[in-house]
Image (tube, grey):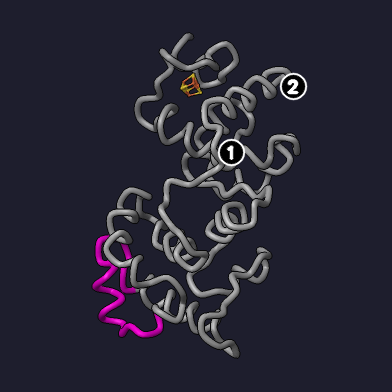
Amino acid sequence: MQKKNIDIFFTTLQKLYPENRTDLIWKTPWQLLVAVVMSAQTTDKQVNNVTKHFFDNIQTPYDTLQLSLEQRSQLIKGVNYAPTKARNLYTTAQMLTEGRTHPNYHIPDTLSDLIKLSGVGEKTAKVILHVLYNTNDIAVDTHVHRVMNRIGLVNTASPIQTSKIIDNAIPKRYAYIAHHTLIFFGRYHCLARKPKCESCPFTSFCRYYKNNINS
Ligand code: SF4
């Protein structure tokens, strides 16, 4: 992809999605971690529908530790793999409060420390780092993977492959905005089944458009 088109792509995305935010609704760092862990294999909308019923009462890991496994599973039963996620969140709550007194806890601010937490993989960790600590980390989900391949920034077969090379594929000056703009563009415009190419500002250089729509 030509440099000038990369510039057009990211500056346009920034105008389309100026707010660096996530669709997940949260107020405290613990709620963010809970929501991101719950969002694995589950849409943000589903997660928000579930968390709105209990986030008023679960603001810190200490609140989670008050609940039994059955209560935790029941609270989050609207998301996929609820029992496993409920177990992981309890273990993580224990880890974050160990040696501390209520209400103190600290969500780790490095990738290596975050992935030590139960149920926190690299993608989850990068979302937390980016949203909570404003880092340049880019979590590659299916939206990011699809958009990066369609537009022509990478040529990869899986999100894991894309994740391995994404830092080199995106100029550093756009790394911070890339995370949320790519997710939103993939979620709301460059849809998996029916991309909205007819109203897309990138048709002049999009690889997918050239090879599949305008060929
Ligand atoms: S032209 Fe179509 S496939 Fe290409 S980025 Fe735009 S919506 Fe996606």
Q: Mark 2 = which residue?
A: 3
* Label 1 C-beta lies within 8 Å of the nearest ligand 1 atom: no
Residue 156 circle label? 1
| Horizontal side, residue 53 vs residue 109: left or right | left
CA gap between label 1 and label 2 equals 20 Å
Q: Which residue appears at 57% of the width and 77% of the height?
A: 105
Q: Which residue appears at 63% of the width and 27% of the height?
A: 10
Q: In the figure, residue 71 lies in which quadrant?
A: bottom left
Q: Is residue 82 magenta?
A: yes
Q: Nearer the viewer, residue 119 or 179?
A: 179
Mark whose residue sits in front, 1 or 2: 2
| Horizontal side, residue 129 vs residue 67: left or right | right
Q: Position of residue 214 (x, y in %)?
A: 47, 9
Q: Position of residue 82 (x, y in %)?
A: 31, 68
- Of pointers 1 and 2, the one earlier in the residue sequence: 2
Q: In this picture, is 199 found above or below 78?
A: above
Q: Quadrant of the N terminus?
A: top right
Q: Nearer the viewer, residue 142 or 113?
A: 113
Q: In this picture, is 189 found above or below 144?
A: above
Magenta segment: 64-83
Q: Amino acid at mark 1?
A: Thr
Q: Is residue 152 magenta?
A: no
